[in-house]
Amino acid sequence: MSKPSDPIKDVEPPRAEGQQAGGAPAPDYQQLFQQLVARANGGDPDALARLRVFLDKNPRIWRQAGDLAAVAERSWIELIAGTNQLVAESARRQIDRLKEDLGGDSPTVIERVLIDHLAACYLAAQHAEIQAASPAGGSLEQASFRLKRAESGQRRLLAATKTLATLRALVPGGLVPANLRLHDRKEEQTA
């Protein structure tokens, strides 16, 4: 089993190209960023304060590192694909297509959250189905556990699908802002 990828290591902070004034080579910003994160992880309060300032100025980085739905998807894909990069890349593309198809033209924030959850449930259910179908051997209890796990994954996937469908059935136009007026009261009074 492979270890889930570290979202901090997957983030690339902005890089300076070329040289600084005076001919000195540009610093390795990625290495400096990794050192800052390591110091903050080690409990250095100054490093944590600097990391917070850096993230405030670079929201793209915290959005990418903090995208826990993407972390979950990567983890499930790594479990499913192992070292097979063809399967891993194909699964990533399949999930991206599934999310795009489910999202449509302009999904609301709540729809995007539900779609992310549904994608993770889909991957978990597929992993459980693969494990249940694999000739892993073992005892009858182990085979029963794998089957129950597959059934549980299927129930979670169906619940996520139902939740998204219910939201769309109850609020077909998406979520309407609370301060939006559908008609003008002056028109009502003159009619």
Image: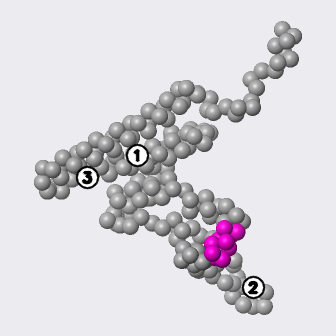
Residue at horizontal 50 percent and vertical 47 percent from the top: 116
Dot 1 crowding, Cα within 10 Å, few <14, some 14–19, many 20+:
many
Q: Is residue 103 visible?
A: yes
The residue beneath circle 2 is 20
Q: Gap between marks 2 and 1, in whole Å?
A: 48 Å
Residue at horizontal 82 percent and vertical 13 percent from the top: 188
Residue at horizontal 23 percent and vertical 45 percent from the top: 147
- The answer to whether 88 appears left or right of 137 in the picture is right
Amino acid type at circle 2 is Gln
The residue beneath circle 1 is 121
Asked if disc 3 and disc 1 are in contact, CB closer than 8 Å, the reply is no
Q: Residue furthest top?
A: 191
The residue beneath circle 3 is 131
N-terminal of the two: label 2 or label 3?
2
Which element is circle 1 on? helix
Which element is circle 3 on? helix
Q: Gap between marks 2 and 3, in whole Å?
A: 54 Å
Magenta segment: 45-54
Amino acid type at circle 1 is Cys
Q: Gap between marks 3 and 1, in whole Å?
A: 15 Å
